[in-house]
Amino acid sequence: MLGDLSFNEMREYVTKLGLPAFRGNQLFDAIYSGKTLNEITNIPKNVQALIQNDYPQVKITKKLESRDGTKKYIIQFADGEIAESVLMKYKYGNTICVSTQVGCRMGCKFCASGLHGLKRNLTSGEILSQVVLINKGEGGTLKERKITNIVLMGSGEPLDNYQNVIKFLRLVTSKEGLNISERNISLSTCGLVPEIYKLADEGLNITLTISLHAPNDEIRRKTMPIAQRYTIAEILRACDYYIEKTKRRVAIEYTLIKGVNDSDACANELIKLLKGRLCHVNVIPLNYVKERGLTGAIREEAYKFVGILEKGGLSATVRRTMGEDISGACGQLRNEVLAGAK
Ligand code: SAH
């Protein structure tokens, strides 16, 4: 598929078809501008006919806007599967939250994305198309981007789709492409330890975010099946390696679930666990997922929890919840359109 190719690979692709290399530049430009084949005006029809089977067939099928300005885009791929991507507007720029898989097989008990298991991985071009189409939807072009930051925090476990995610990161940061700064990209994982080590060795300066959600393995195993496979100690050792290689601060996500991980004792245990590490804790009151039957802590409790962490010497903040009214907040992406749920 053409959407998976880098600038140089695109030039090689057209050369193999017996076309001049500049057609590759034109194609690259068209794909990164989010054009459909019909919208390309500078490539003759007979050349378009040669490439049409490889040209990305992606489209925005729906756009929902939240009261707070957050937008959820539903993007459909050639086989009819969809991805949900969320655009959040901040003072410093626009952040897009991309999905890396259709569904998810991690099965976290509080999250909607894994309700129906994993459908399939997204290709690098399909992950990229979310950024390209939303950039276009927001009035951006290849040269004048409307997207400044990317978080890999939509549906799916990015490190469970490792190769495609790495290729996506290289495409989206490439000079000829959207040229998004590596430092403005965050990848969130539930803690696939071997892949964290691999990621540290990729030479990418992105922010690693760990979905920890518990101060010890016993509590973590109650809500996250992955905790049966890797211990918190193993995850934190991998984080230390990541910090050593990239010199970047790691982010820790801690979703507060009432009666599960929200006690003062949990906060104190978390301090012991993380103190002295180059990390920042984001505390998120659990967002509502109707099938999951768990209750979120209220914001006041989240501030209290953060207060304890800060007193104990950790850097911590309560994450703003955005887009909850359009089911666009953390853990609420569920492929609603396909599943038919409302
Ligand atoms: N699979 C990756 C990427 C998903 S990121 C990961 O686990 O990190 C989405 C973030 O939202 C994760 O930190 C996830 O644990 C969190 N999350 C999931 N369900 C949530 C919910 N109902 N409320 C708040 N946060 C939730």
Image (tube, helix red, strand yellow):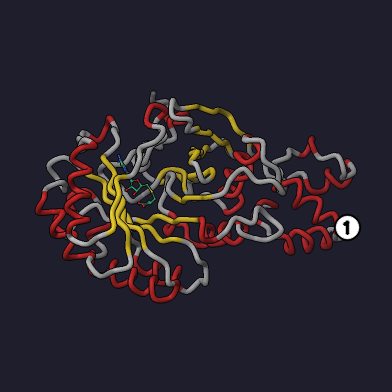
On the image, the x and y values in percent for residue 272 come to 16, 65
Q: Secondary structure at mark 1?
A: loop
Query: Seen from this angle, which residue lies furthest left?
Result: 265
User: As rendered, which of 89 and 158 lies closer to the eye?
Assistant: 89
Query: How many numbered markers are drawn?
Result: 1
User: As rendered, which of 236 and 218 lies closer to the eye?
Assistant: 236
**For this view, does 44 lie left or right of residue 300?**
right
Q: Is residue 81 visible?
A: yes
For badge 1, the amino acid type reads Leu
On the image, the x and y values in percent for residue 2 come to 70, 52
Asked if residue 143 is positioned above or below residue 116 in the image, the reply reads below
Q: Which residue is mark 1?
A: 19
Residue that appears at 62% across and 35% down: 138
User: As rendered, which of 56 and 242 lies closer to the eye?
Assistant: 242
**For this view, does 24 lie left or right of residue 34?**
right
Q: Quadrant of residue 17?
A: bottom right
Residue that appears at 9% across and 54% down: 265
On the image, the x and y values in percent for residue 318 come to 29, 45
**For this view, does 104 lie left or right of residue 221?**
right
Residue that appears at 34% across and 67% down: 193
Residue that appears at 26% across and 46% down: 255
Q: Quadrant of residue 289?
A: top left
